[in-house]
Amino acid sequence: MPVATVARFNVTPVKSTALHHPDGIDLQREGAVGDRRFLFARPDGTRLRGVSKAPLMPIVSTWSMADERLTMRFPDSSSAEGSALPTGERVDIKLFDRTVPARAIDPGFTEAIRRLVDETLTVFRVEEPEFAGGGHRASIISLASVADVGSRGGDPQLDPRRFRMLIEVDGIEAYAEDGWQGRRLRLGDAVIRLGRRVDRCVMTNLAPDTGANDFDTLKVLAEHRRVGTELLLGVYGDVERPGRIEVGDAAEMVD
C-alpha cells in the first residue's frame, strides 16, 4: 500500500467562515481543539441553509483561547473584536445531524454580522463538550480524489478546501480512502476509526475564498460517485485515541 501523509488541516473557530491551515492540530475525542466552537444562527436556533451561507465564507475569524478573545474580519475591511465568553441564555441550535446547546456571545459580533451579512443572525458559542462540526469528529479526503473530481469537471487544479474536510492526505490513489471504512488509522499520536463515506451537499459547488458558485461538483459526483441518493466523497472518522497530528505525519493502518 502506498504511504499516505498528512498534507493539510482545515479548521476555523467559527463555522462557515474562512479556513485556517495550521501546521498541527490537537485532536481530542470531541474534535480538533479550537475548531468550530462558534456558529451563526437565528435566535430560535435555526441556521442558514445551502448557498445562503456563501456570504459567511470570506469572513476571517480568529480566536485567542488563552485570552478568550474573538476577532472577525469582513470583506469590506471592517472588523469586530470582543470577548468570546458566553453571555446569553441557552439556545438549542439545529445542525444537519443533531442539536447542540449554545449561548450568544458579545453582542458586538451580532451587530456586525446583521449589518453586513444577514439581519436575522446571532453569533453563538457552542457549549462544551459539543462543537459545531459534524457528529463524527474527524473527516479525511485524499488530494488524488479531489484532483480526479476536478479533472472530470474541467478543472484539474480544483481547490480541495471547498470540501472543508478536517484532514487532507497525499500519496495515495484517488478514492483509496473508500477502502479505509471500518479500519483504524494512525496519524501522528492519534488513532481514528474510519466510518461511512461523506454525502456531499451544494456547498461544495462554492469557491472557498469568495463563496462564488464556480464549479458544479454535484454534477460531477452524480456521474460517477452516486450510491442511491447519495453523492459520496471522503470519509468520516471517530477519535479512538486523542493526540497531536502534524503536517507530514504518516497515515498508517493499525488494523
Image: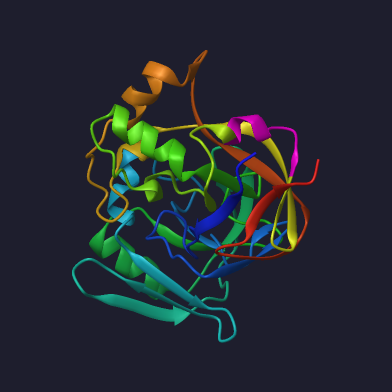
Measured along the vertical axis of the image, is residue 255 above or below residue 22?
above
Describe residue 248's horizontal placement relative to residue 253 as left or right. Answer: left
Image vertical order of residue 52 relative to residue 88, above or below: above
Q: Is residue 179 magenta?
A: yes
Q: Is 89 placed above or below 92 here?
A: below
- Is residue 1 shown left or right of residue 47? right
Q: Residue at x 50, y 69 (%)?
A: 22
Q: Which residues are magenta?
A: 177-184
Q: Picture coordinates of residue 208 (x, y %)? A: 32, 51
The front one of 78 and 192 is 192
Q: Nearer the viewer, residue 88 or 192?
A: 192
Q: Quadrant of the N terminus?
A: top right
Residue 183: image x %, image y %?
Answer: 75, 37
Queried whether the magenta region covers residue 69, the answer comes back as: no
Percent across and percent down for residue 81 are: 39, 80
Instruction: Give residue 249's quadrant in the image.
Output: bottom right
Give the residue drawn at x 47%, y 56%: 15
Query: Is 16 on the left or on the right of 90, as rendered?
Result: left
